[in-house]
C-alpha cells in the first residue's frame, strides 16, 4: 500500500516506528501532487521549502523518541484562508494574490508546535463565499471521485486533497457548511467544531460569529486527533474558550433525534436512505431513535445569508488598496483608490454578498432584515435547546443531493444558497457537527451524513463514527 | 421589496464597489430574487424576542493591563502597495 493511502494516524505510527522518514513522506506526497493535481486543482500553492526545512528539524526529535504529538511528522494541507507567516495566503481571491501574512494563525502555530508541517495551501471559494469551489480566482477544483463534478465548498480544495490522497489530513473552515458539505461530496470526514472551541486568530474573516476552523480527514479518528491539537482558549481570540473535555456518551441508551424537517421534500431519496440507515445501526446497539422537530428549518437559509452577508460587508471593508492586497494602478483620489481596488480585486460572488450585507444593514432596512435575522437566530437556538431536551445527538444529511456537475450552480446564486439547507442552522446555533461518509448513489458519488451534538460534546460525535 | 437600478447604485456606493453595466443589470435581477427570498422572514412573529448576536454566553472580563510586544512596523508594512518613512502612503485626502 502506498504511504499516501494511509490515514494520518497510520502514517504517524509508521513515522514513529521509523519505518519511513518525514522527508520520504514529503517525497511521496509531492510526487503524487505533481502527477495528479493538474487534473484536480486542489492546491493554490505548495510549500516544499518550508516542509523540507521543518522535516529536518522534526526528524531528529522523532529519531530520539521525542514525540510532540500523536501526529508528529505528519504533513497537513491548510485551506488558503489560514494565515501562514511569510507564505502566500490568497483566500482564493485576486485581492490577496501574493499576500504573505506577517504572522501565522493560532491554529497553524498549534500544529507546528505539535511537529506537524505544511504541504501546501488549498483551493477554496473566494473569501469562502460559495458552495462548490468554483468562485475561486484560481480556477475550480474537481471532485476526485468524479472529475465532472464539483468537490463542494468552500473548503473544496482541502476535502478533495484528502480524498485524492494528495494530503493525509487538512484544515478547512466552516461558516455555513464549508467543511461538512465538501467532506460529504468527496467521501471524507470533517468536523465543524463548537463555536468558540478553536481560535479564529489568523483566520481571514468571512462571518465572524459563525466561522470555525476544523479538520478534514480520511476518517473520524484522524479528525479527532487533529481537533485535539487545535482546540483550547487563545488570548488572541476573545470568543475562543477553554472547555473541559466532555466524555463520550455510551451508545447504549443514547437518544438519537431525527428532525422531520430534514428528511422531507427536496432530499434525494438515495441520500435519505443512506443517512437514515445510520440510525438503524445505532439502534441495533441499544440507541433510542426519536423524532424531533426543528420548525424553523425553512427560515434558516434567509437568516444565515442575512447574518453572514452583514458580517462579511463589515469584515471585507478592510480591503481598501492601502495596507495590503490588490491596489489599483491609476486612481487619482483616495476614494477612487478604494473603489477601483475593490472592484478589480473582488470577484462577482464577493461583490454580491458585500452589497447584500450593505443592504440589510442600511438605514430603513436594518430592522426588517438584520435585526429580524438576529431574532430568528435566537428562536433557532431555542428550537435546538428544546430538541436536545429530547435527544442527545441529531442525525441529518449534509446536503440535499450528491455533488452537482461543474458549472450548474454559478448561473443561479439563489439555487446555490438553497443547497446549504441542512448545514447553516448548525452554525447559527453554534453547535458541533461531524460529517461522515455513509454510502454512494447510483452514479457512485459519495453520500455524507452529519451528527450534530450539544456544545462541546465533540467526543460523543467521534464515538458514533465507530458504529 | 423591489430592487431597481437606483438601489443597486446606492449599494455600490455603500460598498465602495463599481459594477460594469453588464454586471449591474445581472445584479439587479439576482438581488431581487435573493432579497425576495429573505422577505419570507417577515411572516414570522418575533415580537419580544431579543436579537442574538453571539451564541456563547460570554461576558467581558477585564484583565490586568500588561505590556507586550506587537509586530514590528517593517513587518506590517511589507505588504503595503505604497509606503514612505515607515507609514502607509495615500493620496491627499484633505485640501489645504
Image (spheres, helix red, strand yellow):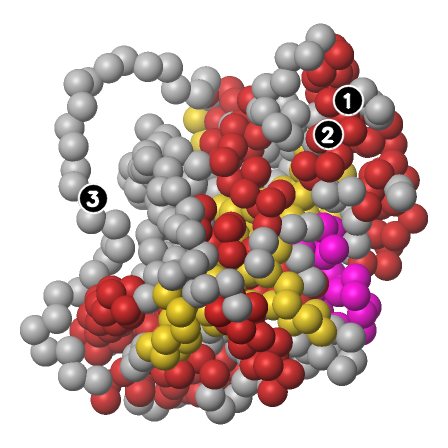
Q: Which residue is mark 1?
A: A17
The residue stretch that appears in magenta? A141-163
Q: Is residue A7 above or below residue A393?
A: above
Whether residue A132 is visible to the viewer of this picture, yes or no, is no
Question: A324 or A247: nearer the eye?
Answer: A247
Q: Which residue is mark 2?
A: A13
Location of residue A405 in the rendering, given as x and y in whole percent from the top left corner = 73, 78
Residue at 79% across / 66% down in the picture? Answer: A145
Q: Is residue A56 above or below residue A240?
A: above
Which chain does tag 3 point to?
B
Q: Which residue is mark 3?
A: B58
Residue at 68% across / 12% down in the picture? Answer: A65
Location of residue A197 in the rendering, given as x and y in whole percent from the top left corner = 39, 42
Q: Are marks 3 and 1 on the same chain?
A: no
Q: Is A98 on the left or on the right of A379, as rendered? A: right
Question: A122 or A317: nearer the eye?
Answer: A122
Question: A203 or A431: nearer the eye?
Answer: A431
Mark 2 in CB contact with mark 1 (< 8 angstroms): yes
Whether residue A66 is visible to the viewer of this picture, yes or no, is yes
Mark 3, residues whose alpha carbon is within 10 Å: few (<14), some, or many (≥20)?
few
Query: Is A286 colored magenta in this rendering?
Result: no
Indicate the quadrant where residue A379 lies.
bottom left
Indicate the quadrant where residue A51 lies.
top right
In 3D space, how far apart are the residues under numbered discs 2 and 3 (Cα atoms)? 40 Å
Amino acid at each position: 500500500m502506498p504511504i499516501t493511502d494511509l490515514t494520518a494516524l497510520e502514517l504517524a505510527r509508521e513515522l514513529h516506528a521509523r519505518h519511513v522518514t518525514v522527508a520520504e513522506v514529503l517525497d511521496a506526497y509531492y510526487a503524487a501532487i505533481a502527477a495528479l493535481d493538474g487534473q484536480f486543482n486542489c492546491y493554490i500553492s505548495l510549500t516544499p521549502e518550508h516542509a523540507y526545512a521543518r522535516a529536518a528539524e522534526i526528524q531528529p526529535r522523532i529519531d530520539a523518541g521525542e514525540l510532540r504529538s500523536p501526529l508528529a511528522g505528519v504533513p497537513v494541507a491548510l485551506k488558503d484562508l489560514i494565515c501562514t507567516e511569510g507564505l502566500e495566503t490568497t483566500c482564493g481571491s485576486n485581492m490577496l494574490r501574493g499576500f504573505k501574512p506577517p504572522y501565522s494563525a493560532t491554529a497553524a502555530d498549534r500544529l507546528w508546535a505539535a511537529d506537524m508541517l505544511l504541504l501546501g495551501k488549498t483551493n477554496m471559494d473566494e473569501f469562502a463565499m460559495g458552495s462548490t469551489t468554483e468562485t475561486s480566482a484560481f480556477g475550480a477544483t474537481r471532485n476526485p471521485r468524479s472529475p465532472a463534478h464539483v468537490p463542494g465548498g468552500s473548503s473544496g480544495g482541502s476535502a478533495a486533497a484528502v480524498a485524492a490522497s494528495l494530503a493525509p489530513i487538512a484544515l478547512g473552515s466552516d461558516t455555513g457548511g464549508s467543511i461538512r458539505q465538501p467532506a460529504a461530496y468527496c467521501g471524507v470526514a470533517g468536523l465543524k467544531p463548537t463555536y468558540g472551541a478553536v481560535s479564529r486568530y489568523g483566520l481571514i474573516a468571512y462571518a465572524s460569529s459563525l466561522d470555525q476552523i476544523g479538520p478534514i480527514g480520511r476518517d473520524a479518528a484522524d479528525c479527532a486527533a487533529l481537533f485535539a491539537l487545535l482546540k483550547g482558549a487563545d488570548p488572541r481570540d476573545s470568543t475562543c474558550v477553554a472547555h473541559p473535555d466532555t466524555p463520550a456518551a455510551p451508545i447504549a441508551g443514547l437518544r438519537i433525534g431525527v428532525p422531520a424537517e430534514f428528511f422531507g421534500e427536496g432530499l434525494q431519496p438515495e441520500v435519505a436512505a443512506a443517512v437514515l440507515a445510520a440510525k438503524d445501526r445505532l439502534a441495533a446497539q441499544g440507541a433510542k431513535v426519536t423524532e424531533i422537530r426543528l420548525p424553523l428549518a425553512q427560515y434558516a437559509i434567509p437568516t444565515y445569508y442575512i447574518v453572514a452577508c452583514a458580517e462579511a460587508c463589515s469584515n471585507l471593508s478592510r480591503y481598501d488598496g492601502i495596507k495590503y492586497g490588490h491596489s489599483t494602478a491609476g486612481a487619482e483620489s483616495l476614494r477612487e483608490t478604494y473603489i477601483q481596488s475593490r472592484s478589480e480585486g473582488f470577484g462577482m460572488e464577493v461583490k454580491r454578498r458585500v452589497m447584500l450585507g450593505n443592504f440589510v444593514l442600511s438605514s430603513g432596512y436594518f430592522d426588517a432584515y438584520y435585526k429580524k435575522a438576529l431574532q430568528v437566530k435566537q428562536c433557532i437556538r431555542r428550537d435546538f435547546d428544546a430538541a436536545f431536551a429530547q435527544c442527545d445527538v441529531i442525525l441529518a444529511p449534509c446536503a440535499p443531493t450528491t455533488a452537482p456537475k461543474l458549472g450548474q450552480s454559478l448561473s443561479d446564486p439563489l439555487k446555490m444558497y438553497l443547497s446549504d439547507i441542512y448545514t447553516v442552522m448548525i452554525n447559527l446555533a453554534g453547535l458541533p457537527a461531524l460529517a461522515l461518509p455513509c454510502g454512494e448513489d447510483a452514479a457512485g458519488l459519495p453520500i455524507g451524513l452529519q451528527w450534530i451534538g450539544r456544545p462541546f460534546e465533540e467526543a460523543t460525535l467521534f464515538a458514533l463514527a465507530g458504529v | 421589496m423591489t430592487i431597481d437600478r437606483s438601489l443597486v447604485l446606492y449599494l455600490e456606493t455603500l460598498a465602495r464597489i463599481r459594477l460594469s453595466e453588464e454586471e449591474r443589470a445581472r445584479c439587479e435581477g439576482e438581488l431581487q430574487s435573493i432579497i425576495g427570498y429573505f422577505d419570507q422572514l417577515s411572516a414570522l412573529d418575533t415580537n419580544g424576542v431579543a436579537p442574538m448576536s453571539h451564541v456563547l454566553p460570554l461576558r467581558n472580563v477585564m484583565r490586568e493591563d500588561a505590556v507586550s510586544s506587537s509586530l514590528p512596523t517593517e513587518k506590517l508594512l511589507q505588504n503595503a502597495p505604497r509606503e514612505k518613512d515607515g507609514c502607509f502612503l495615500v493620496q491627499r485626502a484633505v485640501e489645504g
